[in-house]
Amino acid sequence: MSKPTFEDRRKLEVKENKLQEMRTQSKMKRDVTVAVSAEGFYRTGIMCDVIQHAMLIPVLVCHLRFHHSLNVLEESTKYPFKNRALLQLALTHPSYRENFGTNPDHARNSLTNCGIRQPEYGDRRIHYMNTRKRGINTLINIMSRFGRQHETESNITHNERLEFLGDAVVEFLSSIHLFYTFPDLEEGGLATYRAAIVQNQHLAVLARTLNLDQFMLYAHGSDLCHDLELRHAMANCFEA
């Protein structure tokens, strides 16, 4: 199969833009009216906006209980964190989402259908551009981004970035310890020792010693029910 020419790429870009425009047009959607009997219902005076705000109460209670429990973690580690947001970020697994109760889908549907709906102001393409998409254009856009010239807070809400940084820190500390512990050992031997020390199974033991598994935020699904997956998540949390 021959490589696509520049003209083929231009045609593909035009078609993708046309498809994007069709998706943002509200006339492509249709409203469905469902008739529901009012028999057995009572007029309480509670409107949809009150319900929408009430659905956020479990999230608020969960947030307050979690930060109150972090006092126990700080007492056990004997280190008071200056920035609790970083501590929460380090304990947040990528699978974690705000838990609304026994069935989160019910709460999300209620929040979508009650009270304030999706914004109708401005250009709809601006609201759609922040959604996650795949394709060569998205890849090119990501690869063309430059680093910031000044310190900027990240918008990512899980611990994978901190894990990336913590992995280097753990290897650095292990390298220093091995360097001074074995002054006559060559580079190959030091690398072998370090590779044996910095393993997920060992980091998971350290995480369990700190009881990090009792403070981790992750989705209660089938993914982390297996002990191997849970130990891997605990090791990543320890690095973060």
Image: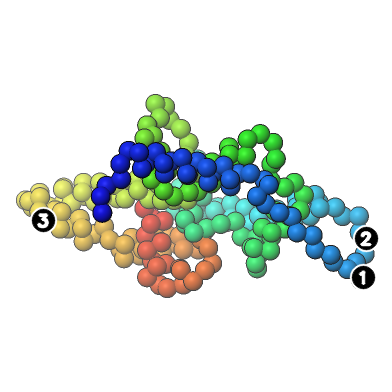
What residue is drawn where x is 16% and y is 48%? 179
- Label count reads 3
Q: Is residue 169 left or right of residue 103?
A: left
Between marks 3 and 2 in the image, the one whose residue lies nearer the viewer: 2
Q: Would you say the residues marked 3 and 2 are in contact, meaning their CB atoms lie under 8 Å apart?
A: no
Quadrant into which the N terminus falls: bottom left
Q: What is the C-alpha distance between the residues marked 1 and 2? A: 11 Å
The residue indicated by pointer 2 is: 43
Front in this rendered view, residue 13 or 151: 13
Mark 1 or 2: the one toward you: 1
Q: Residue at x 58, y 45 (%)?
A: 22
Q: Give the residue type that dot 1 points to.
A: Glu
Q: Amino acid at mark 3?
A: Gly
Q: Quadrant of residue 233?
A: bottom left
Q: Is residue 14 visible?
A: yes
**Mark 1 in CB contact with mark 3 (< 8 angstroms):** no
Residue 81 visible within the image: no
Alpha carbon of mark 3 to alpha carbon of mark 2: how far?
A: 77 Å
Farthest residue toward the bottom?
226
Q: Which residue is mark 1?
A: 39
| Near-viewer residue (95 or 200) | 95
Amino acid at circle 2: Arg
Residue 222 x/y as whole percent: 49, 71
List x then y, in percent, for residue 95: 49, 59
Q: Which residue matches tag 3? A: 189
Measuring from the top left, give residue 100's x and y in whole percent: 65, 60
Neighbourhood count class around disc 3 (C-alpha, 10 Å): few under 14, some 14–19, many 20 upward: few
Give the left or right position of residue 99, taking residue 120 as reference: left
Front one among 38 and 206: 38
